[in-house]
Image: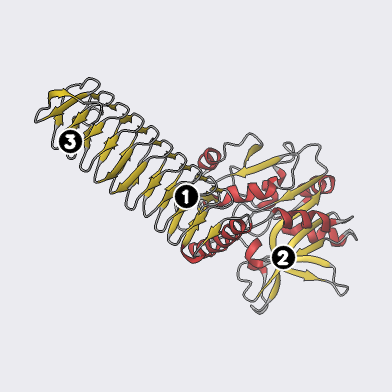
Amino acid sequence: MKSALPKVLHPVCGAPMLSHVLSAAREIEPGRIVVVVGYGAEDVRASVEDPDVTFVDQPDLLGTADAVRRCEKALAGCDEVVVLNGDSPLITGATIRELIASRGEAPLSFVTCFLEEPGRMGRVVRDGEGHVSGIVEASEYSGPDEEAEINAGQYVFEAAWLWEQLPAIAPSANGEYYLTVLPRVAHEQGRPARTLEADPDEVQGVDDRVRLAEAEWQMRERILAGHMLSGVTIADPATTYIDATVSIAPDVTVLPNCYLYGRTSIATGTVIGPGTTLRNSTVGQGTAVQSSVIEESSLGERVRVGPFAHVRGGSTIGDDCELGNYSEVKNSVLERGVKMHHFSYLGDADVGEGANISAGVITCNYDGVNKHRTVIGAGAFVGCDTMLVAPVTVGEGSQTGAGTVVTKDLPAGAKAVGVPARIIGQVKREE
């Protein structure tokens, strides 16, 4: 991969390759899951904080057979052992189940596929009756580089047989111990291995950035199809990017040029896009987000956002709020029915129900050293170009005139204008 990042941590549709493999493994409801770690072990452990995963260290990278042998204690009592590759993110639970079923009474079965250019993959060798007689590693293969049946690297073993054979595996010319020896051993014992032929795109490993991009595209198509078959309208799949970790309810419409990342969750009846980015955010029922960016935040029900709005980290937008052109909200809470239609910024603010934030309103929340909070009461009307110099409170039902600079708290129902703000009276009921 030509990268400092461990290969299995390179992301495919928002999740490390290893996470996709673990998700597929969980579909067969295994008794135990063991991850063998070597290079970048600390980073790999940190990326998988799941209680159902046991880690086993392989400090010296001495091959696949050595890696599996180190799992014997962690897998004690298991009748079967499935071995998967952490760099094959497209493997599915269905294929793993088929692999297990294919073993029958044989001591092992493994996944194969046919490739026109086998390259570095081990070739499967069969005897005159079609039984697997061995696997020839690419480094030991001297024949023509033509289409061949290759070993994809996923296995299922009869556990007792596996633990008995592993200690007898001799090192290869480079000093490593390979599981690929075991099909030959099984053939010599008169119990030849079985195989399961699979789609090369699903079972091949990702060994470079080109293959990583191909896996991203294939996973993306799988994700989009899954959402559409579950009742989500995706207007233009070619321009829609959805991470594997995103949750979308039925009757959501996703318009062109949208990017849905991370732990985003979208409730039914919403319209997302066009041209919208959601990252680790929650969107409530019946909300519409057009040409805007929502990050690490929550939108309530029937909210209207955009076009060209930006909701930044830590914000909670209540039901029936409206955020218009070039509105920006950061680390703030807007209660139900707040209207903030254009060219305004609320940072570190708490805004009460039904307040109106006019064009050009800004919370001056940073004094050069610390951030300070602004509180705007329910029903307040903050006039155009008002500057709220935090920490400051604008009382419930109060009003500020255009261009007001508020440096001190305003009581409920106050009417204020000027620089700095001065109170010129009380808001009348009809106002």
Image vertical order of residue 424 relative to residue 11, above or below: above
Q: Spatial distance from mark 1 to mark 3, Cα to Cα?
A: 35 Å
Q: Earlier in the sequence, mark 1 or mark 3?
A: 1
One can see residue 369 in this view: no
Disc 1 element: strand
Amino acid under label 1?
A: Tyr
- In the image shown, does 67 or 382 lie closer to the viewer? 382
Task: Identify residue type, mark 2.
Answer: Ala
- The circle on residue 386 is 3
Quadrant (top left, top right, bottom left, bottom right) of the C terminus = top left
Query: Which type of secondary structure does the marked residue at label 3 adopt?
Result: loop
Label 1 Cα neighbours within 10 Å, binned few <14 / some 14-19 / many ≥20: many
Residue 129 percent across, percent down from the top left = 88, 73
Could you tell which of marks 2 and 1 lies nearer the N-terminus? 2
Q: Which mark is residue 198?
A: 2
Which mark is nearer the camera, 1 or 3? 3
Which numbered disc, 3 or 2, marks the residue that appears first in the sequence? 2
Residue highlighted by disc 1: 261
- Rendered image quadrant of residue 413: top left
In the figure, 143 relative to 296: above or below? Answer: below
Quadrant location of residue 315?
top left
- Is there CB contact under 8 Å for labels 2 and 1? no
Q: Viewed as shown, does residue 394 lie left or right of 312?
A: left
